[in-house]
Image (cartoon, rainbow, N blue to C red):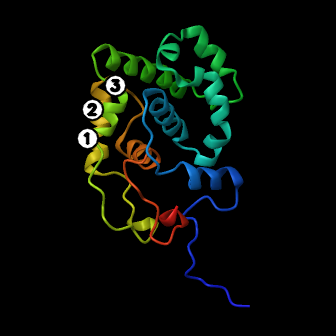
Amino acid sequence: MSTDTTAPVRCFGTGDPLYEAYHDHEWGRPVRGDAALLERIVLEGAQSGLSWLTILRKRDGYRAAFAGFEPAAVAAYSDGDVERLMADPGIVRNRRKIESAITNARATVALREAGGSLTELFWSFAPEPRGTRLSTWEDVPAATPESIALAKALKRAGFVFVGPTTMYAAMQACGLVDDHLADCVAVDA
């Protein structure tokens, strides 16, 4: 029995059902809406220093802990909420990461109050499509001019934990760029 080594495969996530589902149904697909984008920014920041699978496994805990990422609700969190969250095993219990989620919710609310939105700001940095898919992960950049500019714009708007590499990961996750590799099953999805 021969196997076709040119058959499409997942470019990541194979072997864990949660990770496979994320790859197949979420990563690289457009995400819009302030709560949805706030969630992705918070989770990308929480991932710093950890595996993405760790964060995926805690995502439901994050959604519960952070009121479904409704910006106004999270923006109203107090020091007492930070202490409560520091004891929550459903999330990464890192004070700076918890406080950054609250800070970023407040920045999202401030954008709304100024007549804008996180969605408008975030998507204004979408680059032109590449036209061709990359072949290997070595070809995928860690940051781009657009992610650098997005990080700067978010920081000016009061966001934290939004460096260029983290924002490029968010751009990938939210469909601003499509970095599924050329032989990935997602090409035909």
The tag on residue 118 is none
The residue type indicated by label 1 comes to: Ala
Q: Which residue is mark 1?
A: 149
The percent position of residue 114, horizontal first and vertical second, equals 27, 15
Element on which disc 1 rests: helix
CB contact under 8 Å: marks 1 and 2? yes
Which sits earlier in the primary sequence, circle 3 or circle 1? 3
Q: Is residue 31 visible?
A: yes
Whole-angstrom CA distance, mark 2 to mark 3, is: 13 Å
Camera-nearest label, 3 or 1: 3
Mark 1 vs mark 2, CA separation in Å: 6 Å
Q: Secondary structure at mark 2?
A: helix
Q: Is residue 13 depicted above or below 151 in this figure?
A: below
Instruction: Pick the residue in front: 188 or 9.
Output: 188
| Residue 177 location (% of width, % of height) | 37, 52
Find residue 117 and name its label.
3
Task: Give the crowd class for mark 1: few <14, some 14-19, many >=20 residues within 10 Å.
Answer: some
Circle 3: element type: loop
Q: Amino acid at mark 3?
A: Ser
Local crowd size for mark 2, using a 10 Å CA cut-off: few (<14), some (14–19), many (≥20): some
The image quarter in which residue 86 lies: top right
Alpha-carbon span between mark 3 and mark 1? 17 Å
Which corner quadrant of the image does residue 112 belong to?
A: top left
Q: Which residue is mark 2?
A: 153
Quadrant holding the N terminus: bottom right
Classify residue 40 as left or right of residue 127. Answer: right
Q: Residue at x 29, y 43 (%)?
A: 148
In this rendering, the answer to whether 44 lies above or below 66 is below
